[in-house]
């Protein structure tokens, strides 16, 4: 199982902009990053799982588009998000 409810709640709490914010771009990128790290470890154990590989590549592309959106709207927020998630962009 990828993310438990408590892990997901902790990620949302850490990256939310307001009190009831559960779907902002920052939260979405953080949740996608957690799923991507899980799928990356899964792919190391199961290299021929092509369906999961497709899902992983799709998630990476979707996260890249959201990061591009954030960087265009607020570069300072983008840099802070990249630093907090430990991404190499």
Image: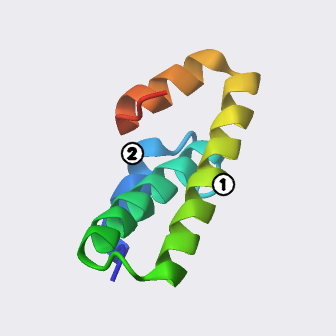
Q: Are marks 2 and 1 in contact (CB under 8 Å)?
A: no
| Closer to the eye: label 2 or 1 | 1
Instruction: Examine the rendering and report whether any part of residue 67 can be seen.
Output: yes
Please name the residue shown 64% across and 52% down the image.
Answer: 61
Q: Report, in whole angstroms, how far the alpha carbon at label 2 lies from the one at label 1.
A: 21 Å
Secondary structure state at the residue bearing disc 1? helix
Of residues 78 and 49, which is closer to you in this image? Answer: 49
Please name the residue shown 39% across and 26% down the image.
Answer: 83
Image location (x, y in percent) of residue 15: 46, 43
Above-or-below relation of 74 to 85: above
Which residue lies most toward the top here? Answer: 76
Q: Earlier in the sequence, mark 2 or mark 1?
A: 2
| 10 Å crowding of disc 1: few (<14), some (14-19), many (20+) | some
Residue ID for mark 2: 14
Is residue 29 found left or right of 5 in the rendered image?
right
Q: Which mark is residue 52?
A: none
Q: Which mark is residue 62?
A: 1
| 10 Å crowding of disc 2: few (<14), some (14-19), many (20+) | few
Identify the image quadrant of residue 47.
bottom left
Instruction: Examine the rendering and report whether any part of residue 20 can be seen.
Output: no
Of residues 6 and 37, which is closer to you in this image? Answer: 37
Image location (x, y in percent) of residue 40: 35, 63
Is residue 8 found left or right of 24 in the rendered image?
left
């Amino acid at each position: 199982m990828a993310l438990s409810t408590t892990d997901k709640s902790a990620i949302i709490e850490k990256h939310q902009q307001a009190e009831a914010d559960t779907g902002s771009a920052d939260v979405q990128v953080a949740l996608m990053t957690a799923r991507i790290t899980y799928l990356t470890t899964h792919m190391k154990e199961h290299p021929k799982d092509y369906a999961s590989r497709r899902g992983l590549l799709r998630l990476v592309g979707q996260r890249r588009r959201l990061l591009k959106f954030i960087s265009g709207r607020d570069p300072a927020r983008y840099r802070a998000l990249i630093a907090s998630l430990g991404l190499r962009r």
